[in-house]
Amino acid sequence: MSDSPIKTSQSALGRFWRNLAGAPRAVWRAAFRSGAPTTDRTRSQFVFNNIFLHIHAVRTHRWSLRWTTTMGLGIAAAAAFLITVVTGILLMFYYKPYPEAAYDSVKDIHFVVPTGRFIRNLHRWAANVMVVTVILHMARAFYTAAYRRPREFNWLIGLGLFAVTLGLSFTGYLLPWDQLAYWAITIGANIAQSPREVTDALGITAYFDPGGFQRQLLLGSDVVGEEALIRFYLLHVMILPLALSTLLAVHIWRVRKDGGLTRPADADRRLGPPPGDVYPVFTDAPMKTYHLAAVVRGRSPAVGKGPENTVPSMPHLFYAELAALMVTVLVCLALAITWHAPLKEIANPDVPENPAKAPWYFLGLQELVSYSAFMGGVGLPAIVLLGLGLIPFLDREQEGTGEWFGGPGGKGLVARSAIFGLAVVLLVETVAIGFGWIREWYPEAPQLLITLLNPGTLIAAAYALYSMWLVHRYDSVRSGAMGLFTCFLCGFIVLTIIGTYFRGPNWTFYWSMADWPKH
Amino acid sequence: MTTPTPSSPSGPSRLDPEPTPRRDFLGLASLWAAASTMLFAAIGMMRLPKAAVLSSPSKKYLVQLPDSLAPGEAFEPPGRAVVLFRDEDGVYAMSKVCTHLGCLIKKNGDGFDCPCHGSRFGIDGSVVKGPAPQPLAWHKVTRVGEAYMVDEGVAVPTGAKEQA
């Protein structure tokens, strides 16, 4: 390209036709300037010339690409989110957020709209897959001690993503406006109101009523009606997806900024020399006349330890991520083909579902809520979230970073904690189901006593004490954290199973559905 | 940052602290203007979602009790979360909304069961079992001709009945 007009033999008209014919290729080249990613240089340009890809580093450490490092769980969660976004936008073509009309439109999507039922199934199942993978991803990050410095903040972002994911699932639950939706949201909105359990017991609700405020903010009314539906719709399709996308971008970006994925200090030694076809950027005898200078964060000088164990992100990392995406799509497709998303009768404010069950991942909480609304629905979840958020700031140790179950105690400690966690939750539940709780023994017992002393708080207290003992026994905060996390995971699983399979009408315990009362 | 400088007879030294330049003043002013605007905008936006008037159905309504209603027999007007009784002492109305998490209770024998989390209430609304923290609310009932006016907005103590 020169400033002066080029004299060519062709006429202007000839150049016009030639440029027109070359236009598609020229547009392509204007968009993707670096050419095919074949060399180390063009592979780097492939990443950093692309606003979406450069959220990743240009090169990826070989440790990060091992299957056991992440099992692709984070990417799977992001992929599931992507599926819910695409299918969700498609569902918005027909969905009408107004009571009755909402139910009819979902019914239309289910029975009339071409591919509507399949898209809705996919949306529903991708949401479930997302919840599962987010929980597993968090467990992976925890058990490999990936929350440690300098990744504390990213762990907090991850907790935010977890909360928003549950919020998205919960708000989506109301939208079909069927019986399932209506009564689950009634319960949910009253859980938001449950701080009243404490303020009522203290007799201060008239002056200080955070519970009533929260419920009204959520429902925009005293009842679950049109105001509640439009609010949940707004949260579900606009506010929470935007919040999640923003947090997700920061989350992935911080992985890069925090030095890639966690790896053990001796990862390079354990990996061995890089394969022959890996072209290192830094070498002892660079074939270049310049040096790359960089300020490297870390505990040891990086001099002479160039990132030889990295490989270009294109194609190594991106192909692996693409594979995780495709596996997620496959799983969601298989689930969506096999099981339909449920649609019950239209919401009837006069007749509650019996039993009225929340989505499965809230049934553990619903089990706790059946002892104390405040503790099960607000108190304990808040304590758990706070505890999870504090972990990286309490555990300032080094041992076991980047290793599965790394830290003093290791796998054995996790196994013993799982046994302890299961034993405690099963024991307390057995007592509560077999013999009732304080109200049945002493009907006059004050509510505050039950709020403070119920199966949920007992289980949590037992776990906390056990964890403190582990801290003392192993002289390590990490050991206590591993024990506590494992216990809570076991408690969550057992309570969820009880809530899902063993609770029938009136939330009574039944060994099987066949034992439910018959008409 | 101020550095002690020797006073110079020939005007201010270049080491003297400079007065705040106009550019800095404008920069700070725009910064604070933006910050305070954001703050007030945020307060205003937070004010919006809390409705001043709630779109709830009316809480006062008339109920015609059937003549055949026996003492201890529940009368549940359709579409209203309320249950009425008539006995020798009078007529009274109780909320059907479980004080635990807002499901509607159902009469069962000499009390009420909540289908959601198994709370059980006595016939007067007292908690017998389960997680409900409060007894069922009693509503104000007023006789209007042959019918009764129930006001869900006004609570009355347990046991307060309207003369039949």
Image (cartoon, helix red, strand yellow):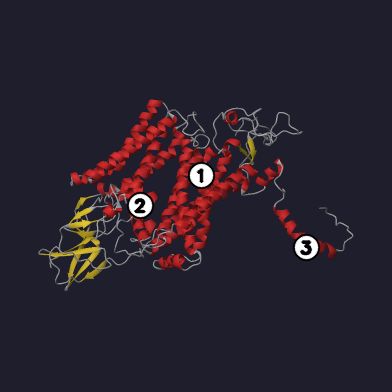
Q: Amino acid at mark 2?
A: Ala
User: Which residue is under mark 3?
Assistant: A20
Tell me what residue is drawn at x 25 percent, y 45 percent.
A433
What residue do we see at 64% from left, 41% from top? A58
- Coordinates of residue A101 in the picture (x, y in percent): 42, 68
Q: Nearer the viewer, residue A193 or A42?
A: A42
| Residue B138: % across, % down | 20, 59
Q: Quadrant of residue A288?
A: top right
Dot 1 amino acid type: Leu
Q: Residue furthest right?
A: A9
Between residue A92 and residue A310, name the one nearer to us: A310
How far from the left and from the top, in percent, is residue A363? 35, 49
- Amino acid carrying label 3: it is Leu
Subunit of label 2: A
Where is A400 relative to A425, above or below? above
* Camera-side mark, 1 or 3: 1
Neighbours of disc 2 within 10 Å: few (<14), some (14-19), many (20+): many
Viewport quadrant of the C terminus of chain B: bottom left
Give the alpha-carbon distance from disc 1 to disc 3, as whole Å. 47 Å
Q: What label sits on residue A73 in the rendered view?
A: 1
- Tags 2 and 1 on a common chain: yes
Q: Label 2, label 1: how many angstroms apart (C-alpha)?
A: 31 Å
N-term mark: 1 or 3: 3
Q: Is residue B19 left or right of residue A440?
A: right
Which residue is drawn at the image coordinates 66% and 27% (left, top)? A304
A251 relative to B89 in the view: left or right: right
**Image marks 2 and 3: residues in contact by CB distance under 8 Å:** no
Give the total of numbered labels: 3
**Which residue position holds label 2?**
A192
Question: Do the CB atoms of the residues marked 2 and 1 lie less than 8 Å apart?
Answer: no
**Camera-side residue: A339 or A79?**
A339
